[in-house]
């Protein structure tokens, strides 16, 4: 476990890292980034709190089973979204220009940053972000557990 200063800074930075990670996930269809990059940023927040508080305390807060479940849920959501449009084609963007959530008409020219014009892309970005968060978070915790075993 690190000093009080490191833990205080980790407490301050962790929510900001989560917010920034989800911002990257949800704006992936408008800016560089997306589900993988945002999920990796969020997993970096997990690595930060593991370093600040130590593995023993974090394994009580963040369960490996929850992270692997998040990985499975993200993958399942991604596959289901891909199969919903199978009437036309696999990965068909059935929400684009539908008027439903994420389905407003796309303006001509440069998109001024409207989040709800991408159809199924934000849903897929969110699914990939959850999957990457779960996968990388579990990898971080498994690596810390293995490092703990080796050092003992």
Image (tube, grey):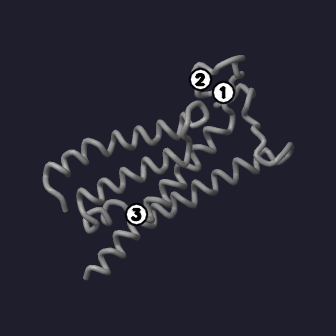
Helix, strand or loop at label 3? It is helix
The numbered dot on residue 140 is 3
Residue at horizontal 42 percent and vertical 48 percent from the top = 42
The numbered dot on residue 56 is none
Distance Cα–Cα, label 1 vs label 2: 6 Å
Q: Are discs 3 and 1 less than 8 Å apart at CB? A: no
- Label 2 or label 3, whichever lies nearer to me, is 3
Count of marks overlaid on the render: 3
Q: Residue furthest left?
A: 4
- Label 3 or label 1, whichever lies nearer to me, is 3
Earlier in the chain: of badge 2 and badge 3, it is 2
Q: Are discs 1 and 2 less than 8 Å apart at CB? A: yes
Residue at horizontal 21 percent and vertical 45 percent from the top = 9
List x then y, in percent, for residue 17: 37, 43
Q: Is residue 122 above or below residue 54?
A: above
Residue at horizontal 23 percent and vertical 59 percent from the top = 53
Q: Is residue 59 above or below residue 48?
A: below
Name the residue tied to disc 2: 114
List x then y, in percent, for residue 64: 42, 66
């Amino acid at each position: 476990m690190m000093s009080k200063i490191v833990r205080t800074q980790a407490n301050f930075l962790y929510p900001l890292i989560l917010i920034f990670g989800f911002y990257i996930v949800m704006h992936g269809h408008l800016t560089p980034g997306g589900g993988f990059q945002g999920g990796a940023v969020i997993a970096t927040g997990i690595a930060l709190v593991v370093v600040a508080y130590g593995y023993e305390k974090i394994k009580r807060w963040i369960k490996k089973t929850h992270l692997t479940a998040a990985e499975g849920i993200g993958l399942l959501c991604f596959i289901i979204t891909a199969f919903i449009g199978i009437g036309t084609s696999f990965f068909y963007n059935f929400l684009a220009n539908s008027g439903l959530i994420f389905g407003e008409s796309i303006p001509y020219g440069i998109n001024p940053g409207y989040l709800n014009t991408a159809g199924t892309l934000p849903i897929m970005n969110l699914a990939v972000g959850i999957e990457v968060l779960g996968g990388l978070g579990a990898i971080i915790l498994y690596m810390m557990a293995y490092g703990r075993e080796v050092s003992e």
